[in-house]
Amino acid sequence: MNILDHSHQNTIEAPEDFLPLLGTDYLELYVGNALQAAHYYKTAFGFQSLAFCGLETGVKDRTSYVLVQDKIRLVLTTPLRADTEIGRHIDKHGDGVKVVALWVEDAAKAFEETTARGAKPFMEPQVEKDENGEVVRSGIYTYGDTVHIFVERKNYSGVFLPGFKPWKSSYNPKPIGLKYVDHMVGNVGWGEMNQWVDFYANVMGFAQLVSFDDKDISTEYTALMSKVMSNGNGRVKFPINEPADGAKKSQVEEYLDFYNGSGIQHIAVATDDIIETVTQLQNRGVEFLNVPTTYYDDLLDRVGHIDEDLEPLKKLGILVDRDDEGYLLQIFTKPVEPRPTMFFEIIQRKGARSFGKGNFKALFEAIEREQELRGTL
């Protein structure tokens, strides 16, 4: 709108989005053995080989394997030498998410806007070039040791980023229908949730979608609080959890203990056919949290009509919840690392924009049963 045009003075415009995000560009995990982790994500989750860097490409200190499935890119990175920053990260946290990379039109502007609002710089804007063009990247810190890297790739036609070569493999199990990253949940320390909610609101221009307190998210033993932050176009959503007082140790406390601080708790990935996707995952050895079959006894009374047959949902352990705009189906893996830290959520949305509030109690009781087996409840 022309700022000199006063003919529409009654129009209320939304504030300009100073950090327009096009989506999640990639997730980089620091892992103990990237080669073997890549094999796991290909075999179990149906990711495909995309690119790599390492000794063969002139990188001396690390190796990275890039995997892709539809719009999801995972980068698995392992240090090649002792006493590196990456190695210290793995020693402290175990395998886990280091980078949540966000796709932007202008990485330099994203850096300027966020650091001007108080973000701690991680990477000054830098231009990376090869024969396929150039990428501009910059980065800021968020909770714990996690960082956001802004990726501008409009002038690049290469396989992933400059310095990466295509990774050809004769072993390519079929994809299982994972489409894109729906949301990523962060666990932060006692009393820190509102600090990070303010960070996403003030530094990154996100809005709060919804909040849950310990009355919403509690069982007989444990409790937590959660607020969901979303960017302007809704493509990037970050729920943020903190522990709350309960009779025993909550899943968030357990995570903070084993991860040694704040970090990404789970990655929620979308599918258009959760029954098929979860069937494939189970056939490939992925283990899920189990809810009691009694959960399904009154399911349709709680959520109303759904398109799916109840029997396969019950057999697979898929949860259902409804909000004003529709319903969703979701299921959670057990942790995919030796430490009880990071896991995945598989989600299919049938109109619902919420996060499964009606399932929290059943889900957290399932997590508590796992904690009891680990002796950490």
Image (cartoon, helix red, strand yellow):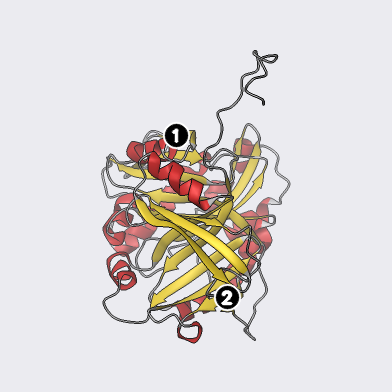
Q: Quadrant of the C terminus?
A: bottom left
Q: Against 154, is 38 above or below?
A: below
Visible residue check, residue 267: yes
Q: Which comes sooner in the sequence, label 2 or label 1?
A: 2
Looking at the image, is mark 2 or mark 1 nearer the viewer? 2
Q: Against 6, is 343 above or below?
A: below
Q: What residue appears at the point 30 percent right and 69 percent down from the top-left corner? A: 85
Badge 2: residue crowd in 10 Å (few <14, some 14–19, many ≥20): many
Visible residue check, residue 377: no
The spot of residue 220 in percent (x, y) is 34, 42
- Dot 1 falls on a residue whose secondary structure is strand
The spot of residue 323 in percent (x, y) is 60, 35
Q: Of the residues shown, which amino acid type is indicated by label 2?
A: Ala
Q: What residue appears at the point 45 percent right and 50 percent down from the top-left corner? A: 185
The number of callouts visible is 2
Name the residue that disc number 2 marks: 51
The spot of residue 197 in percent (x, y) is 39, 38
Name the residue that disc number 1 marks: 211
The spot of residue 208 in percent (x, y) is 48, 34
